[in-house]
Image (cartoon, grey):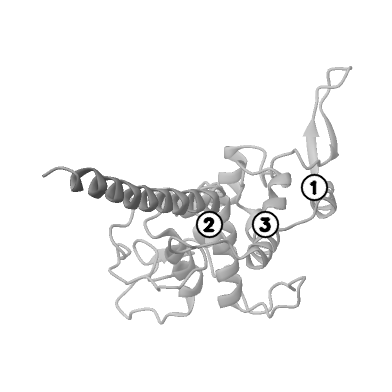
Amino acid sequence: MRALLFAVSLLTVSGAFASSGHHLKEVSWPFDGIFGTFDRQAAQRGYQVYKEVCASCHSMSLKSFRNLQEIGFSEAEVKSIAASYTVKDGPNDAGEMFDRPGRPSDHFVSPFPNEKAARAANNGAYPPDQSLLIKARHDGANYVYSLLTGYDEAKPADLQLGAGMSYNPYFPGMQIGMSKPLQDGQITYADGTKATVDQMSRDVVVFLQWAAEPEMEHRKQMGIKVLLFLFVMTGLLYVAKKRIWSQIK
């Protein structure tokens, strides 16, 4: 997932185009539209992609393990996931910090202890936190999907890549400092879904969309209720108005 390394640090893309002028791929997402919802099975697969691929570089500091229950993980599964991490805690009675297994209330564990360590491991660049990554770009879902699936594009003959850079037409400047992050069959999905680059990219986008806007379903449901209320009230007020004015000649 290092391909997203500089995603937040550059200027926001205007319209549906990257700065290279390459049109983003358009996907019909389950969370689009007024009736949009999160595909929880896809979001769970997306978490697996994040855990096994993205989490080696990117933190997700605004999410706690217990939040995973919102996308369908059971309480027991969340406890097991949290316990698989080591969390630094303390100080204890002796004034020392200590390590312990993670708890559901803990935030996702960062891959690096501090920013300098993160930069040292990534050629000076600071991998952005992915908690709000989708909201940090215009048309973020399509942008991230296009970026992750854009590495197979043929490089223009006149484009000179810098040392250690990879060609990606959807990244500003068309070259990115990290190689292709996803490969077919790279992970084994717990539900048996075939892990193609396209599938993993779609799933992780659903997960990141949920992470950035977990209240989306509630907000849309409330909006529908408000619209229905206004529609009914408009009808009642119209009927009342007709009855009142019908008696005035």
Residue at the image position 23 percent from the left and 49 percent from the top: 242
Say what amino acid the circle numbered 1 marks: Ala
* Secondary structure under the numbered disc 3 in the rendered image: helix
205 on left or right of 146: right
Query: Which numbered marker is on residue 181?
Result: none
> 135 above or below 30?
above
Residue 35 visible from this viewpoint: yes
At label 2, the amino acid type is Gln
Q: Which residue is mark 2?
A: 209
Q: Residue at x 33, y 53 (%)?
A: 235
Q: Are marks 1 and 3 in contact (CB under 8 Å)?
A: no
- Earlier sequence position, callout 2 versus callout 1: 1
Q: Nearer the viewer, mark 2 or mark 1?
A: 2
Q: Separation of disc 2 and disc 1 at Cα?
A: 21 Å
Q: Which residue is mark 3?
A: 71
Front of the two marks 2 and 3: 3
**Residue 44: x and y, percent?**
68, 62
User: Which circle marks residue 82 in the picture?
Assistant: 1
- Examine the image and state in which quarter residue 86 appears: top right
